[in-house]
Amino acid sequence: MKGLRLSFAITLAVICVACSPAPDSPVAPIRLVDLFKPDTISGTAPAEKELPRTEWRFDGPPPGTSGAPIPFAATRGVEAGPGIRDLAVRDGRLVGHSTTSVPILRVGRATDHDSRDQFHAVEITLQVSAGANLTISARGAAPFDLAGAEKQIQSPLGNVTTPIVAGPAMQTYTVTSPVPLSMARARQIVIRPTDAAGATFTIESIRIISRREHLAGMASGVGWQGLGEIYRESLVGRAPEVMSFDVTLPDDAWLDVAVGTVDDTPATFRIAAAPSGSEREERVLLEHTVTTPYRWERRAIDLAELAGRRVTLSLALTGQPGTPALWGAPVIRTRQGRAGDDRPQGVILIQADTLRPDHLGLYGHSRDTAPFLGRMAAEGAVFKQAYAQAGWTKVSTPSILTSLYPSTHGVSKLNDRLPAAATTIAEVYRQAGYATLSLSSVMFTGQYTNLHQGFEELHEAASVADLAGPYSSKTAREYVDRTADWIDAHRDEPFFVYLHVFDPHSPYEPRRPYDTVWANPATRDEHIRQRELLRKTVADPFMASRGMATREEMLAADIDPAAYLAHDKAWYDSSIRGLDAELARLFERLRGAGLDERTAVVFLSDHGEEFQEHGRMWHGQSVYGEMIRVPLVARWPGRVPAGVVVEEPVQLIDVMPTLLDLSSLPHPDGMQGQSLAPFFRTGPVQRAGLGDPAPTGWRSRPAIIEKQPLDQPESPSSDEAYAIVEGGWKLVHNQVRAPDRPEFELFDVVRDPLDQVNVADKHPDVVQRLARMLSGWHATAVAARLKPDSESSGTMTPEELQRLRSLGYVR
């Protein structure tokens, strides 16, 4: 898409797979977003009426004293927290001193915004004498301990940090929210004005900018816009502007579009077509009035009567002058756009978060947790040794969607974003004319990580704050409904869906009727009591908030670890059973649409979960078996033979090239996985030769897993480890580790899949051999690392850069 591609030649094996040229493609869709140019717009929209600003200034009189008292009136509503002294208003500015490296200020807005509006950014005009970074954190209306904010604002989760320029000059910084956040969750703003102790700071103004205010000030054109929790590639216009596009309509064409506003004033969306270069009267195709803002209203407009004609398609909004109009993912599609018989009509990639394979019957679990998935595996292929590239969602998912190792794609920490130079699987399908949809159950798989690249439409959980409550992780039921409805609307064209469901993730307790399938309801209250006790006693605040403890912490709290874990595992298994029922329902809808045998489906998990196999709970803290062995199942009747069982180690980076091969689509440069398609051919698996530069068969090579450190010193998250699986062995290299952990650990992956017995001392030759291979891989992967956007943007034209920024791919 962007022309910024990197080649990768791994030292362990040649991993790129040659793919045959794609057969004749179906009629390509016409995306109006791609056709937009500044001269597309005619007419001049007046500026929208000025919206009330939420701003703190210090150059006017103090707030009035009538009515309710205004807190901290002397400092215009700004409260000094820890690390601040001498906060005062002088000469029309707020001044103060930092006594620590974590000085804290808080402001709270008294007036409320429309709760449906979104928080866009904080704009602060500031001068500091020393320091390197400014940090902003948005919070809801609930009271919180300001003293505790000192520790919380140092966490990368939920906070945004931007570099500052220390010196005598006043600077304006705009800190944009990295995740969708409603204005109701931005009632208070916590500010760390500098990260230096002993600094002076001067603040001229602080302003909260809502998304509606942002829209009112931005130029009409391409944008990535959301209403509710649904985001689309969009055209943003204003009444009474008209956007016009000259297009030649294919046979059996229709316009797929969603419309919406952010204004309570009624607005009428009008779409018309007129023969290009003709004086003939235009034909009105749609007049649709929207009276409910902040929601998309999808419309399918039949264009068949205009087939084969060159027309000017116009999009206009009638309403209060200046009112923003959102045209969501306007695409001219054709009902003759089905893929050929040698390619799937649809492709669905299902990612079940936090799912261990040993808790599935098809991988040997004693409980029948996933009967439908077992049937799906019997109708296709199951991979018994599939390895994730990382042990948590933030890092693992980019590897799945780009076929790149973490050391290459560059996402390793909470606030990292996938560089726009990466090519996602969705971008390849979009370029090939497929309709593309993503459903993201957590911010790590959506915009926060820049994983919306290539999707026309994204449904995503609003923020990490949504992950609260007993059933917050059970997303499959709702997302299967949305997926099935979307597929019904796109059943006559090629489509690609990324469906991320969260059900196995904690909190484990499932919805009814699954809550009592294996868990004893009589012990529920006691289990919850013990979890609340652990929340008060566990040392790590993150683990404490989830009631997850080490074995030692449980014993110290007089809790039986075996009984506690048994209850959690029963809930975990029951959540999988609930997920399985929703998967069965999705396939039921596919059969009803006649797509069951025309859709290629891959089911996998991004990582597993630890239940104290190595002393802890949760995930992301290691590269051990319970964390990085994952289920992997592929089904496409006719192309993936039924009953295939693959014992060979494979990796999740192999999924993208596999699906592209099944769809006869080209591979982007630099992919580090290889296609699993050789396992789907009849007869013995074709093996690639060592010297084959373009292998068409399977090349056995090691699986690689990474655990890069997070910015949380003195916790398991700060460890750094890499693992290699090859020849029945697994070597773990603990590069940054606790004092009691050895540098190298060696495990027999067949006899010891959960890495319980370290046999490194018995096989020093194996350790040395695998250590050399791992070191060679690491050097090559790091050398291929994608450039961050700050470096690669210099090679793009201004138009390319503006487009990527408008879609949120570059910030």
Image: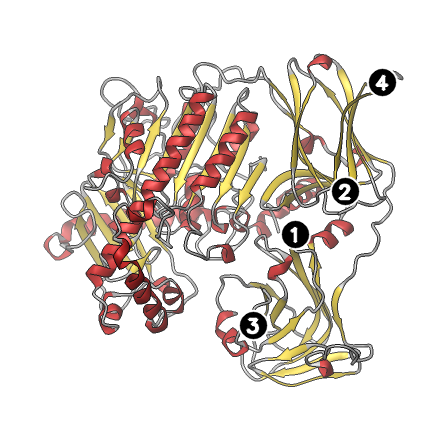
Q: CA distance from mark 4 to mark 1?
A: 43 Å
| Furthest residue toward left | 762
1 or 3: tag closer to the N-terminus: 1
What is the three-letter code of the residue carrying label 2? Ser
Whether residues under marks 4 and 1 lie with C-beta atoms below 8 angstroms apart, the answer is no
* Residue 268: percent from left, percent from top: 78, 35
The mark closer to the camera, 1 or 2, is 1
Please, which residue is most extreme toward the right here?
Answer: 279
Residue occupied by mark 4: 277
Of the pair 407 and 187, the residue shown nearer to us: 187
Q: Is 135 placed above or below 452 here?
A: below
Residue 143, label in figure: 3
Residue closer to the observer: 702 or 439: 439
Circle 1 residue = 116
Identify the secondary structure beneath mark 1.
loop
At horizontal 28% and vertical 22% (from top left) the residue drawn is: 642
Element under disc 4? loop
Q: Is residue 508 above or below residue 153?
A: above
Residue to which mark 2 is pinned: 220
Can see residue 660?
Answer: yes
**Distance (Cα) linking label 3 and label 2:** 39 Å
Which of the two labelled residues, at mark 3 and mark 2, occupies the earlier sequence position? Answer: 3
Secondary structure at badge 2 equals: loop
The answer to which image quadrant residue 131 occupies is bottom right
The answer to which of marks 4 and 1 sits earlier in the sequence is 1
- Spatial distance from mark 1 to mark 2, Cα to Cα? 22 Å
Q: Which mark is residue 772?
A: none
Query: What's the residue type where badge 1 is placed?
Result: Arg
Mark pair 4, 3: CA separation:
63 Å
Location of residue 277 in the rendering, given as x and y in whole percent from the top left corner: 85, 18
Residue at disc 3, secondary structure: loop
